[in-house]
Amino acid sequence: MITRTIVFLSSLFLLANIAQSKPLDVTQPQVVGLYFNASWCSACKMLDPQLQAASEDLKKSPFLLVKLDVSNRVTQHQAGMLASAIGYGDLYSQTGVKTGFVILLDSETGEEIGRITKDEDAAAIVNKVKALTKA
């Protein structure tokens, strides 16, 4: 009996929270960054912390960073399907397993509008992305 009461009260609490939840604010990206990454990539190990630091300043920016992990055959297959699902399958195929950079694309045209490499720090990444977005 106690278990049923707990389950019932938990269900009521969950329903109350769902009823009070606010819709998420969804923004269309203006720039898509395809990050070609692998666990064995030394350039990626240098770029990862810079992208992480930049992400805090870019969290409200119309910029979508998509990490394409090409570490092994399984992740390559998954990355290929992800790239294809968002409309960049051909670009993924052309790039192959080159890693350690981000290709910046205009989300409307799919045109490459820039790149981010291991040589850029977080501030340079933020400045580059903000210059490419209209926000």
Image (cartoon, rainbow, N blue to C red):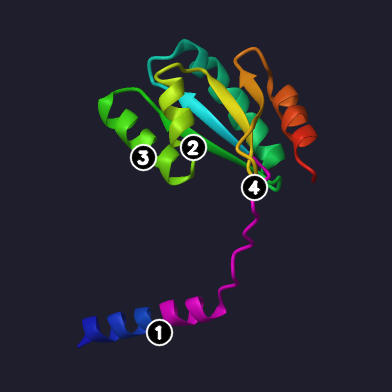
Choose top left, top right, bottom left or bottom right for residue 47: top right
Q: Position of residue 31 (x, y in %)?
A: 66, 39
Q: Dot 1 surroundings within 10 Å: few (below 14), some, or many (20 or more)?
A: few
Q: Which residue is mark 4?
A: 29
Work out how far the residue at label 1 is from the one at label 3, CA to CA, in angstroms.
Answer: 39 Å
Q: Dot 4 surroundings within 10 Å: few (below 14), some, or many (20 or more)?
A: some
Work out how far the residue at label 3 is from the one at label 2, CA to CA, in angstroms.
Answer: 9 Å
Q: Which residue is mark 3?
A: 81
* Residues under numbered marks 1 and 2 in contact, where contact means CB atoms less than 8 Å apart: no
Please, what is the three-letter code of the amino acid marked with disc 1? Leu
Which label lies toward us, 1 or 2?
Answer: 2
Dot 4 lies on which element? loop
Choose top left, top right, bottom left or bottom right for residue 119: top right
Q: Quick one: label 1 or label 2, which is nearer the N terminus?
A: 1
Kindly identify the residue that appears in the image at 65 percent across and 55 percent down: 27
Q: Nearer the viewer, residue 38 or 53?
A: 38
* Residues under numbered marks 3 and 2 in contact, where contact means CB atoms less than 8 Å apart: no
Magenta stretch: give its range.
12-31
Dot 3 lies on which element? helix
Q: Nearer the viewer, residue 102 or 125?
A: 102
Q: Which residue is mark 2?
A: 88
Q: Quick one: label 1 or label 4, which is nearer the N terminus?
A: 1
In the rendered structure, the answer to whether residue 38 lies left or right of residue 2 reads right
Say if 118 sits above or below 14 in the image.
above
Kindly identify the residue that appears in the image at 49 percent across and 37 percent down: 88
Dot 1 lies on which element? helix
Residue 12: numbered disc = 1
Please, what is the three-letter code of the amino acid marked with disc 3? Met
Say if 123 sits above or below 27 in the image.
above
In the rendered structure, the answer to whether residue 78 lies left or right of residue 31 reads left
